[in-house]
Amino acid sequence: MSVWGSVRIIRATAWAWSFAALLQGQAVLVAPAAAADLVDFASVALATSSAEQPERSPREAVDGDEKTRWAGDNAQPGHWLQLELSEPRPVSACRLVWEFPNRTYLYKLEGSTDGKNWQTLVDASQKARPGREELPLPGTELPRTQFRWFRLTHLGNHWPSVRELR
């Protein structure tokens, strides 16, 4: 495991990489890569959000520390956390950890190549999903779609607060 700035890179297998540090909820994005493809995401990614509490910035969702977290400024649905990479990356799975891993959450995780047109990767808008989960992303079979932007949108039932997104 290597740590650069606010993003933790984890070597998952000989053919995959993951980055933990998208949101403060805990998600893990995994993509095929050679050792040379391991990237310092702290220098190539920008974490932003629709709103935040003081000292609960989007950066804390991608710092690799589950003790920190991003949090929206109120409990209303619609808050989002977004990660913009410097270039598109292939993705095949996600690990997400919300503030309370033992609860379930309503949300949507999307990917985009241009920051305008979004593809749904995980849709938990009708049926809440666990607060800590690793899941494969549909539509990411080989050849994998490459995304430059990732957006997690909170759709209600708990305060929007993410510990890690990878």
Image (cartoon, rainbow, N blue to C red):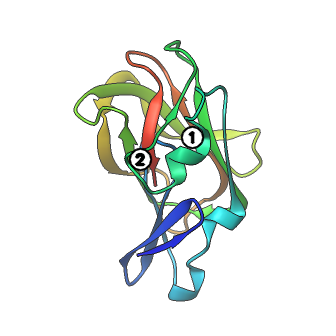
| Residue 9 visible within the image | yes
The secondary element bearing badge 2 is classed as loop
Horizontal side of residue 112 vs 53, given as left or right: right
Numbered mark located on residue 110 in the image: 1
Residue 51 in the image, given as x and y percentages of width and height? 65, 25
What's the amino acid at mark 1?
Glu
For this rendering, which residue is in front, 139 or 27? 27
What's the amino acid at mark 2?
Gln
Residue at 49%, 52% in the rendered image? 139
For this rendering, which residue is in front, 136 or 139? 136
Q: In this rendering, is residue 26 above or below 32?
A: above
The quadrant where residue 80 appears: top right
Residue at 60%, 74% in the rendered image? 39
Q: CA distance from mark 1 to mark 2?
A: 15 Å
Mark 1 residue crowding within 10 angstroms, few (<14) / some (14–19) / many (20+):
many
Looking at marks 1 and 2 on the same chain, the residue that comes earlier in the sequence is marked by 2
Mark 2 residue crowding within 10 angstroms, few (<14) / some (14–19) / many (20+):
many
Residue 102 in the image, given as x and y percentages of width and height? 22, 33
Q: Can you say which quadrant of the picture contains the N terminus?
A: bottom left
The secondary element bearing badge 1 is classed as strand
For this rendering, which residue is in front, 8 or 15? 8
Q: Which residue is mark 2?
A: 26
